[in-house]
Amino acid sequence: MPIVVDIDVMLARRKMSVGDLADRVGITPANLAVLKNGRAKAVRFATLAALCEALECQPGDLLRWEAEGAAGG
């Protein structure tokens, strides 16, 4: 999929665990893992906003587009 999710990058920068982020956002760690690992088909804007608030970042810090077949994604 050409949309890459960089939640793990922001978690590392904020020194925050997946469980802590899930608690702050109000979703299960399992659902956060689905999103973090790029397996989600969609994300609600409310969830994206909550992630940005908890991680003190912009949506573009969490999501980026990468051309199909590009290395590293």
Image: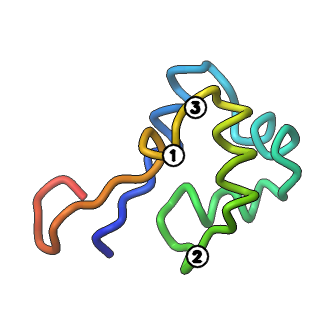
Residue located 73% across and 32% down the image: 54
Residue in view at x 75 percent, y 38 percent: 21
| Distance in Å between CA atoms under marks 3 and 2 | 20 Å
Residue at the left extreme? 70
In the image, residue 70 sits, relative to residue 15, either above or below, namely below
Please name the colour scheme applied to the rendered image: rainbow
Q: Is residue 68 left or right of residue 32?
A: left
Figure quadrant of residue 36: bottom right
What amino acid is at disc 2?
Ala
Callout 1 secondary element: helix
* Crowd tier of the residue under label 2, counting other residues whose Cα lies within 10 Å: few below 14, some 14–19, many 20 or above: few
Which of the two discs, 1 and 2, labels the residue nearer the N terminus? 2
Query: What amino acid type should be assigned to the residue bearing mark 1?
Result: Pro
Instruction: Write the residue at 50% across / 60% down.
Output: 37
Numbered label attached to residue 42: 2
Instruction: Kindly identify which residue carries mark 3.
Output: 11
Q: Are marks 1 and 2 in contact (CB under 8 Å)?
A: no
CA neighbours of label 1 inside 10 A, class few (<14), some (14 to 19), many (20+): some
At label 3, the amino acid type is Leu
Q: Which of pointers 3 and 1 lies earlier in the amino acid sequence?
A: 3
Which numbered disc, 1 or 2, marks the residue closer to the eye? 1
Sequence-first disc among 3 and 2: 3
| Left or right relative to 6: residue 29 | right
Residue ID for mark 1: 59
Q: CA distance from mark 1 to mark 2?
A: 14 Å
Is residue 57 shown above or below 40? above
Residue at image coords 73%, 57%: 47
